[in-house]
Amino acid sequence: MTSLDTLLTEATSGDRPVASAAVAMVSIDGDVVEAFAGVHTRAHGDGGVPPAPTSMDTRFDLASITKLFTAAALLVALDERGLRDHDLVADVLPEFRDGRARATTFADLLRHTAGWPAEWPDRVRDDGAWRRFRSAQPEATPGDRHRYSCVGYIWAGLAAEAVAGERLDAVVRRVILDPLGLQETGFAPEAALRGSIAATEVQPPRGLVHGKVHDETAWALGGIAGNAGLFGSAADLLRFAELLRRGGTTGSRRVLPEWVVEAMTTDRLPSAVGERPPYGQALGPRIADTAWMGSLAARGAIGHTGFTGTSLLTVPGGAHSVIILTNRVHPSRHGPDLGALRRRIADDAAHL
């Protein structure tokens, strides 16, 4: 077994480091048994700002881990209204009342079966961005196939807003962040926090992306979207992972209704759906994805990765949670893949 410190020190040094900043935590039964924070957050082209040491408080662009918070926020908002995941999106969003989209359920959005493409190609940030996005139509009939879709999750964020009657960042804050005490997590961080945030990519034509959402679509839509946009620390993310591991409770308080926990921790793909992935798909998390969960996949691990180099893994009803935060895309997205590193860390955690 190799220690977390050794694995990440090797990964963040040498001729081809995977990232310039890395923080990771492994917990068993809620107790942190390993933690790593190291290297420097380089800032290429950042106006001469010198590198800063990475610490356990460093915030990272969580990228698609945002989808887990969007899923939880939408499901809790549905519960507050007496609705369920099998209800129709058309009941709250008028854009879904015609054409193929009419049969779309909230579950379709959250399990990637709503027929939307993987990405939205129009990434021009102007006053008409949301209008153009909301005029799009799905490519396939809801329920026909599984296709991982950032577009579907942007719609899930809009659905959460419509159900709750408040902006997505406010819904996430009210139903997830505040109940868990997650003070280092949120959308659109203030400029004053930039020094505590790991820079991401040098991204033409934007230049260095630092303290702004890396995902081009979320950025074009203003930085608050259901697919990406959250920034957070490892400790905060571990608390969210533990919420899922512990069945939706923190201490003596229930944060997620029992049916929401079940929806987020069990495979929700219908048997007839086409193009099934090699992992289970809950409403939000993936289940037993051996490509990056290693031997913890066999224990029923759930979780999600983020393009920027982040991942959350936990075993519902089990013992382990693993958080890995890096800025893999700094200064370029063309660096080494993190799949092997994630598997090794998960494998070693399984033996603790």
Image: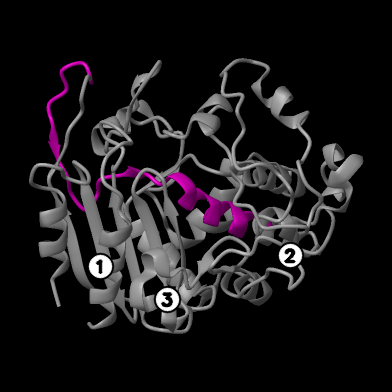
The crowd level at tag 3 (other Cα within 10 Å; few <14, some 14-19, many 20+) is: many
Q: Residue at x 24, y 83 (%)?
A: 351
Q: Name the kind of residue labelled 2 in the image.
A: Val
The residue identified by callout 1 is 345
Provide the residue designation for mark 3.
Answer: 297
Query: Under tag 1, what secondary structure?
Result: helix
- Residue ID for mark 2: 273
Looking at marks 3 and 1 on the same chain, the residue that comes earlier in the sequence is marked by 3
Helix, strand or loop at label 3? It is helix
Q: Picture quarter containing residue 61?
A: top left
Whether residue 221 sits left or right of residue 5 in the image: it is right
Left or right position of 111 against 318? right
Q: Where 339 sits versus 151, above or below? A: below
At x 60%, y 28%, the residue is: 121
- Residue 242, by quadrant, is bottom left
**What residue is at 82 percent from the left and 50 percent from the top?**
141
Q: In front: mark 2 or mark 1? A: 2
Pick the residue in front: 204 or 58: 204
Which residues are the magenta region? 46-74
Which quadrant holds the N terminus? bottom left
- Disc on the earlier residue, 2 or 1: 2
Callout 2: SS: loop
Judging from the image, the colouring scheme is one colour
* Residue 97 in sight here: no
On screen, residue 230 above or below 124:
below
Tell whether label 1 touches label 2 (CB within 8 Å): no
